[in-house]
Image (cartoon, coloured by chain):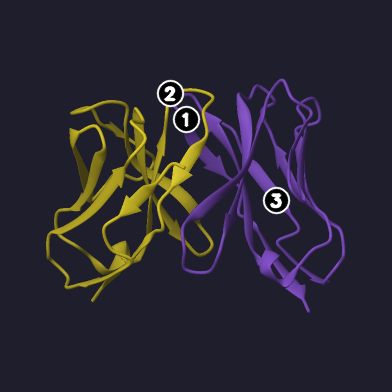
Amino acid sequence: KQEVTQIPAALSVPEGENLVLNCSFTDSAIYNLQWFRQDPGKGLTSLLLIQSSQREQTSGRLNASLDKSSGRSTLYIAASQPGDSATYLCAIPQWGNKLVFGAGTILRVKS
Amino acid sequence: DVKVTQSSRYLVKRTGEKVFLECVQDMDHENMFWYRQDPGLGLRLIYFSYDVKMKEKGDIPEGYSVSREKKERFSLILESASTNQTSMYLCASSLERVNTEAFFGQGTRLTVV
């Protein structure tokens, strides 16, 4: 059974820093990996989907990497801003696109 | 842009009431899902559907049922609400059964008193 772990559980950084969020998974036979953002009390916003055949995927200041052999993905956020403060979740689909989620990383960017 | 819309942001219901949570997506997606999210437990799948009138149990279906009479609409039903069903409920949709991006609604915060 796929298990997804996110480290750290929480992170606080000053504005302008580059930062890395980590996601690890136990079963390397994946279709893809998806990163989401969740603001307090709200739904999930899809940030990036990285296919199993890809090594990286970029959107603006966000860059996601995937290393299937080691069971790891990272989300790199460049030049962080207070508006980036949120919970970041990674998720891996089982067959049928049923998502298995990590517990999330709570990010706070201080101005 | 894909839009997944949940009918309510906040609901307060009494124990024993029958509760309907509605979800509509506008991108002709085949798959629709209901998750609940609780502190310390994360997101857990309640039910999902691959097609109209089809439904499959997820990891925690007890106390819930679903209805999918039209492709764009997926309803979650709490037959007799209980306080342990107080939670954030999240609807999602995706185009196909494998390897497609999932999109979520804004969430419904349900409180059962």
Residues at discs 1 and 3 both on one chain: yes
Residue B34 image position (x, y, % from top left): 35, 45
Residue B112, quarter of the rendered image: bottom left
Label 1 Cα neighbours within 10 Å, binned few <14 / some 14-19 / many ≥20: many
Residues at discs 2 and 3 both on one chain: no
Q: Are marks 2 and 1 in contact (CB under 8 Å)?
A: yes
Q: CA distance from mark 2 to mark 1?
A: 5 Å
Give the answer, above or below, for where A9 lies relative to B64: below
Give the answer, above or below, for where B82 lies relative to B79: below
Q: Amino acid at mark 2?
A: Arg
Which residue is rendered at x = 19% and y = 62% of the image?
A: B81
Residue B4 image position (x, y, % from top left): 37, 47
Chain of the residue displaying label 3: A
Query: A5 or A55, which is in the foreground?
Result: A55
Secondary structure type for disc 2: loop
Q: Is residue A17 left or right of residue B10?
A: right
Q: Quadrant of the C terminus of chain A?
A: bottom right
